[in-house]
Image (tube, rainbow, N blue to C red):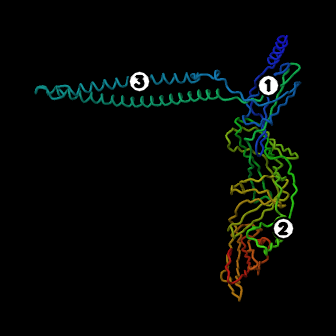
Amino acid sequence: MKKLILVPALLFATLFANATTEKIYKTNVEKATVYLQGAQLFHSTDISVPAGMSNVIIEGVSPYLDQQSLQASGKVNFTIIDVFFNVKYPDETAIPTKKPINKFLKQLKAYIDSISDVDFLIMANADKKNQFDIEKNILLSNRLMKGEFKRDSLNILKDAMEYLRQRLGNINTELMKVKREAQKLTNEKARLDEKYNELQELANKVDEEKQVKAQEPVYQAIVSVSADVATQARLSINYYVANAGWTPDYELKASNTSNEIAIVHKANVQQTTGIEWNDVKLTISNGNPAMNNNKPELTSFYINFYQPYRNTVEIKATSKVPKMQAENLEAIMDMPTSTGITFSNDDAKIAGNVYDVTQVLENRTRVDYNIDLKYSIPTDGKNHQVAIAKKDVKASFEFYAAPKLDKDAFLLAKITNWEDLNLLPGYARIYFDGSFVGKTYINVNNNTDTLALNLGRDNSIDVVRKKLKDKNKNLITSNDKILTQSFTITLRNTKLSNIEIDVEDMIPLSNSQDIVIKNIALDGAVYDENTGRASWKLKVKSHETKTVTYVYEVRFPKDKLISGL
């Protein structure tokens, strides 16, 4: 009775397994959303779905895909049951044995025939040369030519010598032709041999590549579907891979005739996903799925009385515990105890008003740039440049100089409301009036209202900082020593236009109460007591020279030395 029950159950399971059909579809990447780290890849293909359960096998997926991110979708009346990643390893019996490559056989045979023809010509040439050598030897070894003749044979000798001269001349001429022909044939044979060997190596290489390819595993996305009736459908899959990303790249273009600066935003895209991206529609996103997406959690932290460590062996009964200093308590209260990870919300975004081939989509967490042009990005890990956006923005231009550090003046483009540009930190190439002037770094990680873009050096402004040694003084009092330091900064504008320039220098600061620094003269500078920065905003006319002077004194105990001046 048990056998009668088990047999139908096994039969039903077998029939159900056989009823699930499988069909393989080979696909390429159609679309890719490239993040700062990682990419979302999209495949799609037209499929035939039979009635009942079936498996649709999509080949050509990346071997490095994140299996948890794998998704499938379709647009017709069928139900997606499951989707999963699979690696199909080759069957050893199915691997083809090494055979000649048909497409090379005809070319190899042609070279063999050509080489054979040249070999015959070389042999014929050698025979011709041998014939001339024999004839030459016969003439030269003749008894008459050796002088073995009778006295009455003088006329015969003269005729023989004349014949020898003519014939030897002809033979030598023919031998020279034969030798030249032999050299040409030898060179031609060497060329044919080289081409034949190259073609043979290529045939072997192609054959080995096919052999290796036949042994490589195949990476698949298997989609289990169910349909009430047979139907035609469009099936799409997408998944995330970490082996890709992009970095921002900029071009800054400015001109003397305009108060605008053009910011060209590009992306250096690279990928090592193991599959080629051929004619792929790209979306460049400033999102980063690789980051931890959990919000930070603050935890409680506590303060308590400071308990200094005591060595009971050394402490005597009369010893007193020192009072805790106020700064120690403050230090303890300020000690961070939370280990939660914090995240910055100022994700830099990319400039609006983009190229005609780009659409900007801005959501709550990121900015995406859909590029209508298709790009091919090989899986080589190299940077491949993609144009994203171009924005012309209003800017105020001014010059900056810090002659203590650099003798040149720098041109700056200052932009207000720069947060709307959605820039990311990155390097930029600078073009002024169409000429390349250098590189700079766009730093957007600041909280100022104005973004200053460096546009490079301007050699038409001379800046000289000089210490006035004749006005420096060293005065010694009963307890202290007083040093007086005097400097001048001279600017000369050789440009044809007037300029505004921001000049900065530093007054030293003291971190000891025994060292006192006093500003005597700053010549109208704006001075920051916290940083020691002295700033002059100057207007300098064309071919005008301006000079600012500042003086400060340093007072310290005369029995001590100071450093930093």
Provide the secondary structure element on which disc 3 rests. Answer: helix
Q: Identify the residue at image location x=70%, y=39%.
A: 272
Q: Nearer the viewer, mark 3 or mark 2?
A: 2
Q: Earlier in the sequence, mark 3 or mark 1?
A: 1
- Measured Cα–Cα span from mark 3 to mark 1: 63 Å
Compared with residue 64, is residue 119 higher up or lower down, i.e. above or below?
A: above
Provide the secondary structure element on which disc 2 rests. Answer: helix
Provide the residue designation for mark 3: 121
Provide the residue designation for mark 1: 56
The kind of residue tagged 2 is Glu
**Image position of 183 (left or right of 468):** left
Provide the residue designation for mark 2: 330
Q: Earlier in the sequence, mark 2 or mark 1?
A: 1
Query: From where the camera sits, is residue 420 visible?
Result: yes
Rate crowding at label 3 as few (under 14), some (14 to 19) or many (20 or more) other CA atoms within 10 Å: some
Q: Identify the residue at image location x=61%, y=27%.
A: 211
Viewer-proximal residue among 193 and 61: 61
- Image position, residue 139 (x, y; %): 23, 26
Image quarter in which the C terminus is found: bottom right
Image quarter in which the N terminus is found: top right
Provide the secondary structure element on which disc 1 rests. Answer: strand
Q: Earlier in the sequence, mark 3 or mark 2?
A: 3
- Measured Cα–Cα span from mark 2 to mark 1: 67 Å
The kind of residue tagged 3 is Leu
The kind of residue tagged 1 is Val
- Image position, residue 406 (x, y; %): 68, 67
Q: Nearer the viewer, mark 3 or mark 1?
A: 1
How many numbered discs? 3
Viewer-proximal residue among 460 and 362: 362
